[in-house]
Image (spheres, coloured by chain):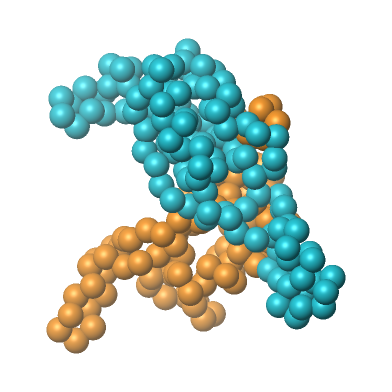
């Protein structure tokens, strides 16, 4: 069993939700997060720095790449279904621009359904 | 994955320290929680859930110790630290994918 964490653009959440229902993954948890990756710098900040704006220059120099709001969606999947889940995410969320996001796959020690007390693969289904 | 729960007022310092140490990629979210101290009691008022920030970064195994040390140094209050400075958790990430190129890292 795996935990799949996808950090994606805010405007892709709804489309991804519907695509995942069709692909057989109706269940997820979503959180608003803010973060950055290797570092896209907003063109407007560069423009500001070129024009001599002190805030823009300070931002480029001190704070590093800007923080961007995104959504973190968490799924659980069995070992066999993980690649289908990831392919569906790519299909919806890949636009080719760097801020598309990331997917992390982590091992899950156990999954338990609170309503029934089931654990393991039965609780994933 | 290095997950750190830190004080909100320390987040900027922690992220800057991580950036300077070579780890720009960090995600953060607002959380609430408490530790073994069961919150804070100030006079008559009990704050049993405190606002914190959770930061997480996925790094190579070899970099883990440096990242943990960087976070501890920048998130601590004072020389020895106090209750409420937070915790760091390490967990395994088996695979990592980049969405923009639709490839596995």
Nearest the viewer among A78 and B91 is A78
Q: Position of residue B39 (x, y in %)?
A: 26, 69
Residue B32 location in percent, x, y? 33, 61
- Could you tell me which residue is drawn at 77 percent across and 71 percent down? A48
Residue A89 x, y percent position in the rendering: 53, 27
Quadrant occupied by the C terminus of chain A: top left
Q: Residue at x 53, y 68 (%)?
A: B11
Measured along the vertical axis of the image, is residue A38 above or below residue A48? above
Q: Can you tell which chain is drawn cyan?
A: A
Rendered view: A12 above or below A1: below
Viewer can see residue B70: no
Q: Quadrant of residue B5?
A: bottom left
| Left or right: residue B58 compared with residue A123 | right
Residue closest to the eye, B31 or B62: B31
> Outermost residue, bottom direction?
B43
Q: Quadrant of the N terminus of chain A?
A: top left
Q: Quadrant of residue A28?
A: top left
Q: Colour of chain B?
A: orange
Residue A97 falls left or right of residue A34: right
Residue drawn at x 63%, y 31% as measured from the top left: A94
Q: Position of residue A20 (x, y in %)?
A: 43, 23
């Amino acid at each position: 069993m795996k935990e799949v964490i996808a950090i994606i653009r805010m405007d892709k959440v709804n489309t991804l939700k519907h695509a995942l229902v069709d692909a057989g993954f109706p269940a997820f948890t979503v959180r608003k997060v803010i973060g950055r990756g290797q570092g896209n710098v907003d063109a407007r900040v560069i423009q500001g720095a070129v024009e001599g704006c002190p805030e823009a220059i300070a931002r480029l120099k001190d704070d590093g790449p800007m923080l961007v709001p995104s959504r973190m969606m968490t799924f659980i999947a069995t070992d066999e279904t993980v690649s289908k889940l990831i392919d569906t995410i790519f299909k919806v969320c890949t636009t080719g621009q760097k801020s598309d996001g990331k997917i992390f796959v982590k091992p899950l020690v156990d999954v338990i359904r609170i309503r029934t007390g089931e654990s393991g693969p039965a609780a994933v289904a | 994955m290095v997950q750190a729960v830190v004080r909100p007022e320390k987040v900027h310092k922690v992220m800057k320290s991580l950036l300077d140490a070579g780890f720009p990629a960090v995600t953060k979210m607002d959380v609430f929680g408490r530790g073994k101290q069961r919150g804070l009691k100030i006079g008559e008022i009990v704050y049993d859930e405190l606002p914190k920030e959770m930061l997480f970064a996925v790094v190579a195994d070899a970099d883990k110790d440096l990242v943990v040390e960087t976070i501890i140094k920048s998130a601590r209050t004072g020389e020895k630290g106090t209750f409420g400075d937070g915790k760091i958790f390490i967990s395994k990430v088996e695979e990592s994918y980049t969405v923009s190129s639709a490839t596995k890292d």
